[in-house]
Image: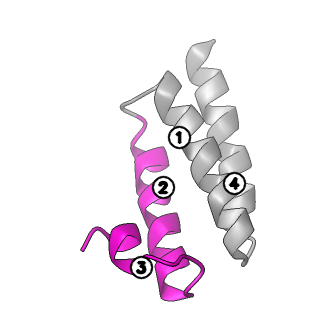
Amino acid sequence: MQRLDAYLYFMQGLDHHHDLSGGSQSRAQELFGKALAIDPKFASAHAFLGYSYIKQARNNWVKDTARATGR
């Protein structure tokens, strides 16, 4: 049941991830994080979490772009 919950959080995160706004990326990150808290080996959640940070940095939706990209 826990993996199903992780998957549902991931799918909700994807919905926000595909919305092109900074607030949606923050919400997606929160949901991907919840998925990873349940299933730390959920590779897709890790990948999209990272991609959402890059998306925020590229669009200047965060103040500290170096932190968002890990540089």
21 left or right of 68 in image: right
Quarter of the rendering containing residue 27 = bottom right
Q: Secondary structure at mark 1?
A: helix
Q: Residue 49: give its label.
A: 2
Kind of residue at badge 2: Leu
Q: Which mark is residue 33?
A: 1
Task: Identify residue for label 4.
Answer: 27
The secondary element bearing badge 3 is classed as: helix
**Which residue in the rendered view is the most extreme toward the top?**
1
Residue drawn at x 73%, y 76% as measured from the top left: 21
Residue furthest toward the bottom?
59
Q: Earlier in the sequence, mark 4 or mark 1?
A: 4
Q: Is residue 15 magenta?
A: no
Q: Are marks 1 and 2 in contact (CB under 8 Å)?
A: yes
Cα separation between marks 3 and 2: 15 Å
- Magenta segment boundaries in residue numbering: 42-71
Is 45 placed above or below 5 here?
below
Mark 4: amino acid: Arg
Q: Which circle marks residue 22 in the picture?
A: none
Task: Give the class, few, some or many, for how many residues have Cα within 10 Å of label 1's Cα (few <14, many ≥20).
Answer: many
Q: Main secondary structure of the magenta part?
A: helix
Task: Look at mark 3 in the image and give the residue it sits on.
Answer: 65
Callouts 4 and 2 close, C-beta under 8 Å: no
Whole-number angstrom distance, CA of label 4 to CA of label 3 = 18 Å
Q: Which element carries disc 2, helix, strand or loop?
A: helix
In the image, residue 44 lies at what x, y percent?
46, 48
Cβ atoms under marks 4 and 1 closer than 8 Å = no
Left or right: where 57 falls relative to 3: left
Q: Say above or below: 69 vs 16.
A: below
